[in-house]
Amino acid sequence: MRVLYFAWVRERAGRAAEDVAPSAGVTTVSDLADFLAQLSPGHAAAFADRTRLRVAVNQEQAGFDSPVAANDEVAFFPPMTGG
């Protein structure tokens, strides 16, 4: 699974992207966030307040209850504002 991080999420996680192989029990974005939060203190900080995060699965906006699979690309980013 390819995971991308943007803006302050990238800064806290300490990387822009990474490939991960979570266990078979990781079936939703929320499960994935739980898994990622355990990787490092920076990851834990990035996922500490999920109300401040948005997510896309395979470049489509998704929610934390959305399913994920081994070959997916999952992106985490802060809410965007337009002008």
Image (cartoon, grey):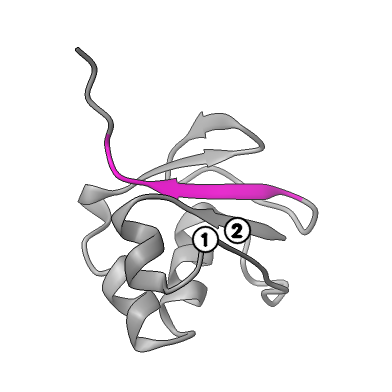
Q: Is residue 81 left or right of residue 7?
A: left
Front: mark 2 or 1: 1
Q: Is residue 74 magenta?
A: yes
| Left or right, 19 with reference to 76 | right
58 relative to 22, above or below: above
Residue sitting nearer the eye, 16 or 46: 16
Residue 16 - label: 1
Q: Give residue 60's position: percent from left, percent from top.
A: 58, 28
Q: CA distance from mark 2 to mark 1?
A: 8 Å
Q: What's the residue type where badge 1 is placed?
A: Ala
Identity of the residue drawn at 42% across and 87% down? 40
Going by the numbered disc 2, the residue's amino acid type is: Val
Q: Which residues are magenta?
A: 72-79
Pointer 2 and pointer 1: residues touching (CB < 8 Å)? no
Q: Nearer the viewer, residue 49 or 13?
A: 13
The residue most toward the top is: 83
Crowding at dot 1, Cα within 10 Å, few <14 / some 14-19 / many 20+, comes out as some
User: Quick one: which residue is furthest to the right in this view?
Assistant: 71
Numbered circle sitting on residue 3: 2
Task: State which quarter of the image contains the N terminus.
Answer: bottom right
